[in-house]
Image (cartoon, rainbow, N blue to C red):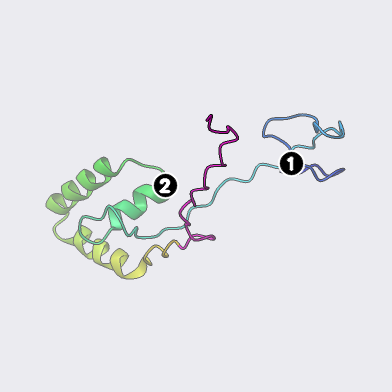
Amino acid sequence: MNCTACGKEIYPGSRFCSNCGQAVVAQPFQPVKSRLYRPRNGRMIAGVCAGFSQAYGWDIVPVRILLAVFVFLGCGTPILAYIIAWIVMPDEPYFIPAQPYTHPVAQPAPPSSQQPST
């Protein structure tokens, strides 16, 4: 976040700008909206349970256990719902970093200023 008066970066949680002293206006809180995706990692079969657990902030294990119980007690209807969710839910988009990773370049050591004694 930057100061509206001088443009200098403000540290999170600051009430005043350390550069110009301007009072910081709090940004309105906007909750993060998570879309329903089938993740690319952590799938067991198709990633439907993992997608629901990530979208709603649930633990994955109870979601999978609950689905297994519903499959045994539901006479096939949960299997049909799982297949429909598999078709309808899109895959998670690939993550492409904004800046590619570059290896740090080792800088040569400066020459020693000591003269060898003769």
The chief SS type of the magenta part is: loop
Q: Earlier in the sequence, mark 2 or mark 1?
A: 1
* Local crowd size for mark 1, using a 10 Å CA cut-off: few (<14), some (14–19), many (≥20): few
| Magenta region | 96-118
Pointer 1 residue:
9
Q: Residue 20 falls in which quadrant of the image?
A: top right
Dot 1 lies on which element?
loop
Q: Residue 8 falls in which quadrant of the image?
A: top right
Amino acid residing under circle 2: Tyr
Where does residue 3 sit, x and y in percent of width and height?
80, 42
Amino acid residing under circle 1: Glu
Between the C-alphas of marks 2 and 1, the distance is 33 Å
Numbered badge on residue 36: none
Pointer 2 residue:
56
Number of numbered discs overlaid on the protein picture: 2
In the drawing, does residue 116 fall left or right of residue 94?
Answer: right
The structure residue drawn at horizontal position 83% and vertical position 34%, both measured from the top left corner, is 19
In the rendered image, residue 45 lying in the magenta stretch gets the answer: no
Where does residue 102 sit, x and y in percent of width and height?
48, 57
